[in-house]
C-alpha cells in the first residue's frame, strides 16, 4: 500500500479567504514544475478574473519550483480565493519510460485526490497550459452520482488509436487536461495506488497519466461539453485563442507551441501576463527541443528588424536540424 503522505515535504496555507469559512469553495488543482510556473500563474489569474463571484480554493502541487516563482505565485491575491502550496519531495518517482516526453509533475494529479480527501468532495484539475474564459460554477453543481471523474472526449484520431490499443470503448477516451474528480469515489476505488502501479510496472504509455486514467476509469467518466476544454493550436501571430466559440469556458494550448514562447505569444495571454508578477520576465525564445520553433523565432526577429539575431537563430535552426 502506497503511503501518499511520504511524498509531501511541506504544505503551506499562505492565503485564506474569509468567504471560504462560510461557503463551500470550488477546489481547483494545478500541478507543475518550474518550467510551467509562469503558465500556472496566468491560469490562476484567468480563473480569478472570470470567477469573481465564486469562492475558490487553489491547491498548487509543485515539484522543484524556484523560490522566485513561488514568491510570484504568492503575490497573486484576490478576496474570494484561498491558496495552499504542496511541496512534493524526490520520493515521488515514475518509471523513466513514462517521463521522457511528459514531465514528472504531470503525474502529481494522480496523488492529489488522496491527499485532499479530508478537504474536498470534488476537485477540478486544470493543466497549467489552460486558460479560463468563463464561469466555472456549473461544474460545482454537476451531478456526479454515477461517475468518478468528468472530462471531455479526446479528438477522433486519439479515440481510434488509444481505444484500439487498450481495448476501450471508442468515443469514451477522455483528455486529462481538465478533469473534475469525485474525490471520495477516487479514494474508495484506491485509484492513486492503481494508477501509480501501472505507470511503474515497466510498461510504456503514449500519454502516461491520461492512458492509465482511461484504462482504470473507462465508462465511469461523465463526458463534458468541449467548452470546458477547447483545444487551441497556435501559429506565429495567429491569436487562435480569441477565435474559439463564444461559449468557451476553458481553452487548452495542446501543441508544443505555447503562448509564453515568443513566436507564439497571443494578445489574450499577454493581457494576463501584463497584470502579473511576471510582467517584466524574459520569456523563452522558443519551445524546448522543438526545432521548428527555433526557425519561427528567427522569423520573428527578422520581422522586428533584428537581422543579426535572425541570422544567428536561423543558423542555430539549421544546426539543430542537421544533427537531430
Image: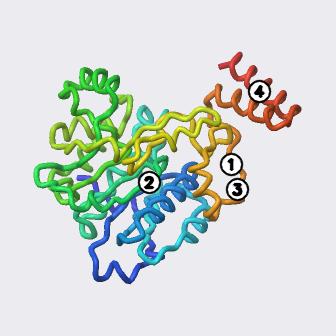
The residue under label 3 is 281
Q: Mark 4 touching mark 1, by CB under 8 A?
A: no
Outermost residue on the front side: it is 246
Residue 288: horizontal and vertical position, in percent?
Answer: 62, 36
Q: CA distance from mark 4 to mark 2?
A: 37 Å
- Mark 1 secondary-structure assignment: loop
The residue under label 4 is 316
- Mark 2 secondary-structure assignment: loop
Residue 133 image label = 2
Q: Nearer the viewer, residue 86 or 4?
A: 86
Q: CA distance from mark 1 to mark 2?
A: 23 Å
- Mark 3 secondary-structure assignment: loop
Q: Residue at x 47, y 53 (%)?
A: 90
Outermost residue on the right side: it is 308
Q: Nearer the viewer, mark 1 or mark 2?
A: 2
Residue 100 is at least partly visible in this image: no
The residue under label 1 is 283
Q: Is residue 236 above or below residue 268?
A: above
Q: Nearer the viewer, mark 3 or mark 2?
A: 2
Crowding at dot 3, Cα within 10 Å, few <14 / some 14-19 / many 20+, comes out as few
Q: Residue at x 42, y 32 (%)?
A: 97
Q: CA distance from mark 4 to mark 3?
A: 23 Å
Amino acid at each position: 500500500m502506497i503511503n501518499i503522505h511520504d511524498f509531501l515535504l511541506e504544505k503551506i496555507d499562505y492565503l485564506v479567504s474569509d468567504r471560504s469559512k462560510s461557503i463551500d469553495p470550488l477546489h481547483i488543482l494545478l500541478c507543475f514544475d518550474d518550467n510551467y510556473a509562469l503558465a500556472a500563474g496566468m491560469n490562476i489569474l484567468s480563473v480569478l478574473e472570470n470567477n469573481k463571484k465564486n469562492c475558490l480554493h487553489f491547491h498548487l502541487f509543485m515539484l522543484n519550483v524556484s523560490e522566485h516563482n513561488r514568491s510570484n505565485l504568492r503575490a497573486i491575491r484576490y478576496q474570494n480565493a484561498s491558496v495552499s502550496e504542496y511541496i512534493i519531495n524526490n520520493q515521488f518517482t515514475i518509471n523513466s519510460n513514462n517521463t521522457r516526453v511528459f514531465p514528472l509533475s504531470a503525474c502529481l494529479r494522480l496523488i492529489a485526490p488522496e491527499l485532499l480527501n479530508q478537504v474536498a468532495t470534488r476537485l477540478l484539475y486544470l493543466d497549467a497550459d489552460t486558460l479560463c474564459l468563463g464561469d466555472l460554477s456549473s461544474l460545482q453543481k454537476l451531478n456526479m452520482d454515477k461517475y468518478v471523474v468528468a472530462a471531455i472526449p479526446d479528438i477522433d484520431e486519439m479515440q481510434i488509436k488509444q481505444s484500439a490499443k487498450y481495448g476501450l470503448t471508442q468515443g469514451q477516451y477522455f483528455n486529462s487536461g481538465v478533469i473534475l474528480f469525485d474525490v471520495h469515489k477516487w479514494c474508495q476505488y484506491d485509484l492513486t495506488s492503481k494508477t501509480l502501479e501501472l505507470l511503474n510496472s515497466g510498461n510504456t504509455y503514449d500519454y502516461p497519466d491520461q492512458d492509465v486514467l482511461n484504462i482504470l476509469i473507462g465508462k465511469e467518466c461523465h463526458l463534458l461539453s468541449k467548452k470546458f476544454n477547447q483545444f487551441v493550436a497556435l501559429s506565429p501571430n495567429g491569436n487562435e485563442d480569441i477565435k474559439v466559440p463564444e461559449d468557451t469556458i476553458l481553452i487548452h494550448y495542446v501543441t508544443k507551441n505555447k503562448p509564453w514562447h515568443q513566436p507564439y505569444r497571443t494578445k489574450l495571454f499577454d493581457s494576463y501576463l501584463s497584470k502579473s508578477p511576471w510582467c517584466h520576465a524574459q520569456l523563452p525564445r522558443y519551445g524546448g527541443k522543438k526545432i521548428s520553433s527555433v526557425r519561427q523565432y528567427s522569423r520573428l526577429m527578422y520581422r522586428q528588424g533584428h537581422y543579426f539575431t535572425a541570422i544567428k537563430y536561423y543558423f542555430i535552426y539549421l544546426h539543430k536540424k542537421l544533427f537531430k
